[in-house]
Amino acid sequence: MILKDHEEEGKKSAKQVHMEPLDPSRTPAMGDYRRILRIKKLSELLGIGISSIYAKLDPKSPSHDKTFPAPVRLGAKAVGWRYSEVMAWIDSLPYSRVDLADEHRRAA
């Protein structure tokens, strides 16, 4: 929650504003093209661990992905990823569907 000052009928007071959790179905047209994701939110969005994200960025790693979005510097010790670039990267991934019924039959 974020506290925000607002004026209501001439009185100044603090109002609680509820921040929505990250919704990957939202499009950049809704203003998310300016959104910056920190590593934890990026990990949640992609469904992979933080170390896997850094492995995708490391040219020495077998998991290196040269198409993975580069982080942007936010401060001396802080980086983030542009939401629009992350979503474009996701959209560029080949589409494949795991057939869970086949996986279940193979396991049996």
Image (tube, rainbow, N blue to C red):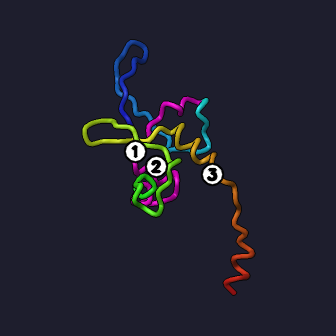
* Residue on which the image places disc 2: 42
The amino acid at mark 1 is Arg
Which residue occupies 47% across, 57% down?
64
* Residue on which the image places disc 1: 38
Kindly give the residue lying farthest to the left in the view shown. 76
Tell me if residue 43 is in the magenta stretch. Answer: yes
How busy is the neighbourhood of tag 3: few (under 14 within 10 Å), some, or many (20 plus)? few
Closer to viewer: mark 2 or mark 3: 3
- Observer-nearest of 1 and 80: 80
Task: Give me the disc on residue 108.
Answer: none
Which residue occupies 43% across, 33% down?
17
Q: Position of residue 58 (x, y in %)?
A: 40, 55
The amino acid at mark 2 is Leu
Image: magenta residue range: 30-53
* Residue on which the image places disc 3: 93
| Image quarter (top left, top right, bottom left or bottom right) of the C terminus | bottom right
The amino acid at mark 3 is Leu
Q: Position of residue 104 (x, y in %)?
A: 70, 79
Secondary structure under the numbered disc 3 in the rendered image: loop
Between marks 2 and 1, how big is the CA–CA gap?
6 Å
- Sequence-earlier tag: 2 or 3: 2
Between marks 2 and 3, how big is the CA–CA gap?
16 Å
Circle 2/circle 1 CB separation < 8 Å: yes
Circle 2/circle 3 CB separation < 8 Å: no
Secondary structure under the numbered disc 2 in the rendered image: helix
- Sequence-earlier tag: 1 or 3: 1
